[in-house]
Image (spheres, rainbow, N blue to C red):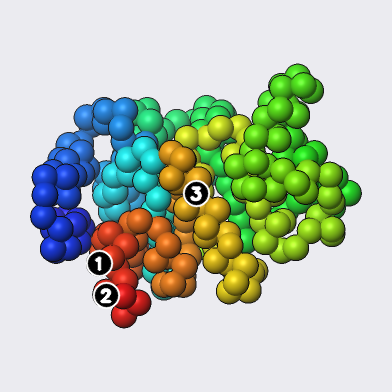
Amino acid sequence: MSDTYSGDTTLGITGEHAISSTAERRAVVTSPGATPSREWVIVTRGLKREYDMGGEVVRALRGVDVAIRRNEYVAIMGPSGSGKSTLMNLIGCLDTPTAGEYWLNGVLVSKMEDDELARVRNKEIGFVFQTFNLLPRATALHNVELPLVYAGIPADERKKRAKEALEAVQLDNRMHHKPNELSGGQRQRVAIARALVNRPSILLADEPTGNLDSATSTEIMKVFESLARSGQTVIMVTHEADIAAHARRVVVLRDGLIASDDRREAFKAQVGLA
Ligand SMILES: Nc1ncnc2c1ncn2[C@@H]1O[C@H](COP(=O)(O)OP(=O)(O)O)[C@@H](O)[C@H]1O
Ligand SMILES: [Mg+2]
Protein backbone atom coordinates (compact mmCIF):
# COMPACT_ATOMS: atom_id res chain seq x y z
CA MET A 1 0.00 0.00 0.00
CA SER A 2 2.91 2.33 0.58
CA ASP A 3 3.34 2.86 -3.18
CA THR A 4 -0.29 3.87 -3.59
CA TYR A 5 0.31 7.49 -2.65
CA SER A 6 3.91 7.77 -3.71
CA GLY A 7 2.80 10.34 -6.29
CA ASP A 8 2.33 13.15 -3.83
CA THR A 9 5.80 12.83 -2.47
CA THR A 10 7.49 12.86 -5.86
CA LEU A 11 5.97 16.07 -7.12
CA GLY A 12 8.79 18.33 -6.20
CA ILE A 13 6.19 20.30 -4.27
CA THR A 14 7.63 21.35 -0.99
CA GLY A 15 5.59 22.75 1.82
CA GLU A 16 3.59 21.40 4.66
CA HIS A 17 0.35 20.73 2.86
CA ALA A 18 1.46 18.33 0.14
CA ILE A 19 3.42 16.26 2.61
CA SER A 20 0.92 16.22 5.43
CA SER A 21 -1.92 15.48 3.05
CA THR A 22 -0.12 12.34 1.87
CA ALA A 23 0.60 11.25 5.41
CA GLU A 24 -2.99 11.94 6.42
CA ARG A 25 -4.39 9.98 3.53
CA ARG A 26 -2.14 7.06 4.31
CA ALA A 27 -3.15 7.20 7.95
CA VAL A 28 -6.85 7.25 7.14
CA VAL A 29 -6.75 4.28 4.73
CA THR A 30 -4.58 2.15 6.99
CA SER A 31 -6.73 2.34 10.12
CA PRO A 32 -9.20 -0.52 9.69
CA GLY A 33 -12.51 0.01 11.47
CA ALA A 34 -11.83 3.66 12.36
CA THR A 35 -14.56 6.16 11.45
CA PRO A 36 -13.00 8.79 9.16
CA SER A 37 -13.49 12.44 10.11
CA ARG A 38 -15.94 14.63 8.17
CA GLU A 39 -13.41 16.06 5.73
CA TRP A 40 -13.20 12.62 4.04
CA VAL A 41 -16.12 12.09 1.69
CA ILE A 42 -14.84 8.68 0.58
CA VAL A 43 -12.56 6.20 2.29
CA THR A 44 -12.05 2.66 1.05
CA ARG A 45 -9.86 0.14 2.83
CA GLY A 46 -8.85 -3.12 1.16
CA LEU A 47 -11.86 -2.91 -1.13
CA LYS A 48 -12.37 -6.12 -3.11
CA ARG A 49 -14.98 -7.20 -5.60
CA GLU A 50 -14.97 -10.70 -7.00
CA TYR A 51 -17.39 -12.16 -9.50
CA ASP A 52 -18.10 -15.88 -9.38
CA MET A 53 -18.48 -17.00 -12.96
CA GLY A 54 -19.65 -20.56 -12.42
CA GLY A 55 -16.55 -21.78 -10.61
CA GLU A 56 -14.05 -19.32 -12.06
CA VAL A 57 -13.53 -16.26 -9.87
CA VAL A 58 -12.90 -12.90 -11.56
CA ARG A 59 -11.02 -10.55 -9.22
CA ALA A 60 -12.21 -7.18 -10.52
CA LEU A 61 -10.89 -5.22 -7.51
CA ARG A 62 -8.13 -6.76 -5.44
CA GLY A 63 -7.76 -4.37 -2.51
CA VAL A 64 -8.25 -0.68 -3.24
CA ASP A 65 -7.30 1.89 -0.58
CA VAL A 66 -8.40 5.38 -1.51
CA ALA A 67 -9.28 8.48 0.49
CA ILE A 68 -11.00 11.44 -1.16
CA ARG A 69 -11.55 14.74 0.58
CA ARG A 70 -14.57 16.98 0.28
CA ASN A 71 -14.14 19.32 -2.74
CA GLU A 72 -11.58 17.15 -4.53
CA TYR A 73 -11.79 16.70 -8.30
CA VAL A 74 -10.50 13.21 -9.13
CA ALA A 75 -10.23 11.30 -12.40
CA ILE A 76 -10.08 7.51 -12.40
CA MET A 77 -8.17 6.11 -15.37
CA GLY A 78 -6.95 2.74 -16.52
CA PRO A 79 -7.16 0.28 -19.38
CA SER A 80 -10.32 -1.59 -20.23
CA GLY A 81 -11.01 -4.30 -17.64
CA SER A 82 -8.89 -2.67 -14.93
CA GLY A 83 -11.87 -2.26 -12.59
CA LYS A 84 -12.95 1.37 -13.15
CA SER A 85 -16.66 0.67 -13.53
CA THR A 86 -16.60 -1.82 -10.67
CA LEU A 87 -15.06 0.84 -8.42
CA MET A 88 -17.55 3.48 -9.62
CA ASN A 89 -20.47 1.13 -8.92
CA LEU A 90 -19.20 0.60 -5.39
CA ILE A 91 -18.52 4.30 -4.76
CA GLY A 92 -21.95 5.12 -6.22
CA CYS A 93 -23.67 2.64 -3.87
CA LEU A 94 -24.98 0.55 -6.77
CA ASP A 95 -23.11 -2.54 -5.60
CA THR A 96 -21.53 -3.97 -2.44
CA PRO A 97 -17.96 -5.23 -2.07
CA THR A 98 -16.88 -8.83 -1.50
CA ALA A 99 -14.48 -7.62 1.20
CA GLY A 100 -13.11 -4.41 2.63
CA GLU A 101 -14.60 -1.18 3.94
CA TYR A 102 -16.31 1.69 2.19
CA TRP A 103 -17.05 4.80 4.27
CA LEU A 104 -19.15 7.55 2.72
CA ASN A 105 -19.31 10.77 4.73
CA GLY A 106 -18.20 8.91 7.82
CA VAL A 107 -20.85 6.19 7.43
CA LEU A 108 -19.91 2.56 6.79
CA VAL A 109 -21.92 1.70 3.69
CA SER A 110 -20.11 -1.51 2.70
CA LYS A 111 -22.25 -3.58 5.05
CA MET A 112 -25.61 -1.98 4.20
CA GLU A 113 -28.60 -3.88 2.89
CA ASP A 114 -30.00 -2.92 -0.53
CA ASP A 115 -32.86 -0.68 0.63
CA GLU A 116 -30.65 1.30 2.99
CA LEU A 117 -28.00 1.55 0.28
CA ALA A 118 -30.61 2.88 -2.18
CA ARG A 119 -31.58 5.61 0.29
CA VAL A 120 -27.95 6.68 0.73
CA ARG A 121 -27.45 6.61 -3.04
CA ASN A 122 -30.46 8.85 -3.76
CA LYS A 123 -29.36 11.36 -1.18
CA GLU A 124 -25.59 11.44 -1.65
CA ILE A 125 -24.81 10.57 -5.28
CA GLY A 126 -25.40 12.40 -8.56
CA PHE A 127 -24.69 10.33 -11.68
CA VAL A 128 -23.63 11.55 -15.12
CA PHE A 129 -23.35 8.98 -17.90
CA GLN A 130 -21.94 8.81 -21.39
CA THR A 131 -25.46 8.74 -22.82
CA PHE A 132 -27.43 11.67 -21.49
CA ASN A 133 -30.67 9.74 -20.81
CA LEU A 134 -32.89 12.81 -21.09
CA LEU A 135 -36.64 12.65 -21.65
CA PRO A 136 -36.99 13.74 -25.30
CA ARG A 137 -40.35 15.48 -24.95
CA ALA A 138 -39.54 17.37 -21.76
CA THR A 139 -37.84 20.78 -21.57
CA ALA A 140 -34.42 21.15 -19.98
CA LEU A 141 -36.09 22.57 -16.89
CA HIS A 142 -38.47 19.65 -16.56
CA ASN A 143 -35.71 17.09 -17.12
CA VAL A 144 -33.72 18.67 -14.29
CA GLU A 145 -36.78 18.86 -12.02
CA LEU A 146 -37.59 15.18 -12.39
CA PRO A 147 -35.47 13.78 -9.52
CA LEU A 148 -37.20 16.29 -7.22
CA VAL A 149 -40.62 15.09 -8.36
CA TYR A 150 -39.63 11.58 -7.25
CA ALA A 151 -38.33 13.02 -3.99
CA GLY A 152 -41.72 14.65 -3.34
CA ILE A 153 -40.47 18.28 -3.33
CA PRO A 154 -43.25 20.89 -3.87
CA ALA A 155 -43.50 22.49 -7.35
CA ASP A 156 -42.26 25.99 -6.46
CA GLU A 157 -39.19 24.67 -4.68
CA ARG A 158 -38.56 22.24 -7.53
CA LYS A 159 -38.55 24.99 -10.13
CA LYS A 160 -36.27 27.18 -8.04
CA ARG A 161 -33.74 24.43 -7.48
CA ALA A 162 -33.84 23.24 -11.10
CA LYS A 163 -33.14 26.81 -12.26
CA GLU A 164 -30.22 27.08 -9.86
CA ALA A 165 -28.77 23.80 -11.15
CA LEU A 166 -29.13 25.02 -14.75
CA GLU A 167 -27.39 28.26 -13.79
CA ALA A 168 -24.53 26.24 -12.29
CA VAL A 169 -23.91 24.70 -15.74
CA GLN A 170 -24.53 28.05 -17.52
CA LEU A 171 -27.66 26.85 -19.26
CA ASP A 172 -30.33 29.00 -17.66
CA ASN A 173 -30.85 30.65 -21.07
CA ARG A 174 -31.96 27.30 -22.56
CA MET A 175 -34.40 26.19 -19.84
CA HIS A 176 -37.39 25.87 -22.13
CA HIS A 177 -35.63 24.01 -24.91
CA LYS A 178 -36.17 20.31 -25.51
CA PRO A 179 -33.21 17.94 -25.97
CA ASN A 180 -33.50 17.93 -29.80
CA GLU A 181 -33.21 21.74 -29.72
CA LEU A 182 -29.88 21.54 -27.88
CA SER A 183 -26.33 20.66 -28.94
CA GLY A 184 -24.59 17.55 -27.55
CA GLY A 185 -22.64 19.65 -25.07
CA GLN A 186 -25.80 21.43 -23.93
CA ARG A 187 -27.58 18.10 -23.46
CA GLN A 188 -24.74 16.81 -21.32
CA ARG A 189 -24.97 20.04 -19.29
CA VAL A 190 -28.67 19.37 -18.71
CA ALA A 191 -27.72 15.88 -17.51
CA ILE A 192 -25.12 17.39 -15.16
CA ALA A 193 -27.71 19.85 -13.81
CA ARG A 194 -30.09 16.95 -13.23
CA ALA A 195 -27.36 15.11 -11.30
CA LEU A 196 -26.76 18.22 -9.16
CA VAL A 197 -30.35 19.10 -8.35
CA ASN A 198 -30.55 16.83 -5.29
CA ARG A 199 -27.42 18.58 -3.94
CA PRO A 200 -25.44 15.34 -3.76
CA SER A 201 -22.21 15.18 -1.82
CA ILE A 202 -20.52 13.45 -4.79
CA LEU A 203 -20.91 13.96 -8.51
CA LEU A 204 -19.92 10.71 -10.29
CA ALA A 205 -19.33 10.81 -14.03
CA ASP A 206 -18.60 7.65 -16.05
CA GLU A 207 -17.00 8.55 -19.40
CA PRO A 208 -18.99 11.81 -19.56
CA THR A 209 -17.34 12.89 -22.81
CA GLY A 210 -17.41 9.48 -24.49
CA ASN A 211 -20.03 10.64 -27.03
CA LEU A 212 -18.70 14.15 -27.60
CA ASP A 213 -16.21 15.66 -30.04
CA SER A 214 -13.04 17.13 -28.60
CA ALA A 215 -14.15 20.79 -28.56
CA THR A 216 -17.38 19.82 -26.78
CA SER A 217 -15.44 17.57 -24.39
CA THR A 218 -13.35 20.57 -23.39
CA GLU A 219 -16.55 22.59 -22.84
CA ILE A 220 -17.87 19.85 -20.50
CA MET A 221 -14.54 19.61 -18.66
CA LYS A 222 -14.77 23.36 -18.00
CA VAL A 223 -18.18 22.80 -16.42
CA PHE A 224 -16.77 20.14 -14.08
CA GLU A 225 -13.84 22.41 -13.24
CA SER A 226 -16.14 25.27 -12.34
CA LEU A 227 -18.34 22.99 -10.21
CA ALA A 228 -15.23 21.69 -8.44
CA ARG A 229 -14.06 25.26 -7.84
CA SER A 230 -17.39 26.09 -6.25
CA GLY A 231 -16.95 23.20 -3.80
CA GLN A 232 -18.57 20.20 -5.48
CA THR A 233 -16.71 16.88 -5.05
CA VAL A 234 -16.31 15.38 -8.54
CA ILE A 235 -15.15 11.88 -9.48
CA MET A 236 -14.87 11.09 -13.16
CA VAL A 237 -13.97 7.90 -15.01
CA THR A 238 -12.27 8.26 -18.35
CA HIS A 239 -9.86 6.24 -20.46
CA GLU A 240 -8.50 9.35 -22.18
CA ALA A 241 -5.37 10.84 -20.62
CA ASP A 242 -6.04 14.37 -21.93
CA ILE A 243 -9.50 14.32 -20.36
CA ALA A 244 -8.17 12.93 -17.07
CA ALA A 245 -5.60 15.74 -17.03
CA HIS A 246 -8.40 18.25 -16.37
CA ALA A 247 -8.92 16.78 -12.89
CA ARG A 248 -6.68 17.90 -10.05
CA ARG A 249 -5.84 14.33 -9.09
CA VAL A 250 -5.58 11.22 -11.24
CA VAL A 251 -5.94 7.69 -9.86
CA VAL A 252 -4.79 4.99 -12.31
CA LEU A 253 -6.11 1.46 -11.91
CA ARG A 254 -4.41 -1.63 -13.28
CA ASP A 255 -5.63 -5.20 -12.77
CA GLY A 256 -7.92 -4.21 -9.94
CA LEU A 257 -5.31 -2.28 -7.97
CA ILE A 258 -4.23 1.37 -7.78
CA ALA A 259 -1.13 1.70 -9.95
CA SER A 260 -0.60 5.40 -9.27
CA ASP A 261 -2.31 8.30 -7.55
CA ASP A 262 -0.90 11.66 -8.57
CA ARG A 263 -1.64 15.32 -8.82
CA ARG A 264 -2.46 16.51 -12.29
CA GLU A 265 1.01 17.95 -12.92
CA ALA A 266 2.79 14.70 -12.08
CA PHE A 267 0.30 12.70 -14.12
CA LYS A 268 0.76 14.95 -17.15
CA ALA A 269 4.53 14.64 -16.94
CA GLN A 270 4.17 10.85 -16.69
CA VAL A 271 2.02 10.52 -19.83
CA GLY A 272 3.89 13.18 -21.77
CA LEU A 273 1.17 15.85 -21.70
CA ALA A 274 3.15 18.42 -19.74
N1 LIG B 1 -20.99 -8.34 -13.63
C1 LIG B 1 -19.80 -8.92 -13.88
N2 LIG B 1 -19.70 -10.26 -13.88
C2 LIG B 1 -18.51 -10.86 -14.11
N3 LIG B 1 -17.36 -10.21 -14.37
C3 LIG B 1 -17.41 -8.87 -14.39
C4 LIG B 1 -18.63 -8.14 -14.16
N4 LIG B 1 -18.36 -6.83 -14.24
C5 LIG B 1 -17.04 -6.73 -14.51
N5 LIG B 1 -16.46 -7.94 -14.60
C6 LIG B 1 -15.04 -8.23 -14.86
O1 LIG B 1 -14.28 -7.50 -13.90
C7 LIG B 1 -13.13 -6.90 -14.50
C8 LIG B 1 -13.20 -5.37 -14.34
O2 LIG B 1 -14.28 -4.87 -15.10
P1 LIG B 1 -14.71 -3.34 -15.13
O3 LIG B 1 -14.81 -2.83 -13.75
O4 LIG B 1 -15.93 -3.24 -15.97
O5 LIG B 1 -13.46 -2.67 -15.85
P2 LIG B 1 -13.32 -1.25 -16.63
O6 LIG B 1 -14.52 -0.42 -16.31
O7 LIG B 1 -12.05 -0.69 -16.15
O8 LIG B 1 -13.26 -1.60 -18.08
C9 LIG B 1 -13.14 -7.37 -15.94
O9 LIG B 1 -12.32 -8.51 -16.03
C10 LIG B 1 -14.58 -7.72 -16.20
O10 LIG B 1 -14.68 -8.71 -17.20
MG1 LIG C 1 -15.98 0.46 -17.60
The circle drawn on residue 27 is: none
Q: Residues within 10 Å of mark 3 (few under 14, many from 20)?
A: some
Image point (81%, 55%), residue name: 179
Q: Residues within 10 Å of mark 2 (few under 14, many from 20)?
A: few
Q: Helix or strand or loop: what does disc 2 sit on?
A: helix
What whole-number distance in Å separates the C-alpha atoms at marks 1 and 3? 22 Å
Q: Nearer the viewer, residue 143 or 120?
A: 143
Reply above or below: 63 against 36: below
> Which of the 4 image quadrants contains residue 78?
bottom left
Residue under pointer 2 = 270
- How many marks on residues? 3
What whole-number distance in Å separates the C-alpha atoms at marks 2 and 1? 6 Å
Answer yes or no: do the residues labelled 2 and 1 have beta carbons within 8 Å?
Answer: yes
Amino acid type indicated by mark 3: Ser
Residue furthest out toward the bottom: 272
Q: Nearer the viewer, residue 41 or 52?
A: 41
The circle drawn on residue 226 is: 3
From where the camera sits, is residue 226 visible?
Answer: yes
Residue 123 relative to residue 79: left or right: right
Residue under pointer 1 = 266
Q: Nearer the viewer, residue 58 or 136?
A: 136
Image point (22%, 29%), residue name: 34
Reply above or below: 130 against 177: below
Earlier in the chain: of badge 3 and badge 2, it is 3
Q: Is mark 2 within 8 Å of ligand 1?
A: no
> Which of the 4 image quadrants contains residue 153?
top right
**Residue 191 horizontal/vertical position (percent):** 67, 49
Image point (38%, 31%), residue name: 105
What whole-number distance in Å separates the C-alpha atoms at marks 3 and 2? 25 Å
**Residue 124 horizontal/vertical position (percent):** 51, 33
Amino acid type indicated by mark 1: Ala
Q: Helix or strand or loop: what does disc 1 sit on?
A: helix
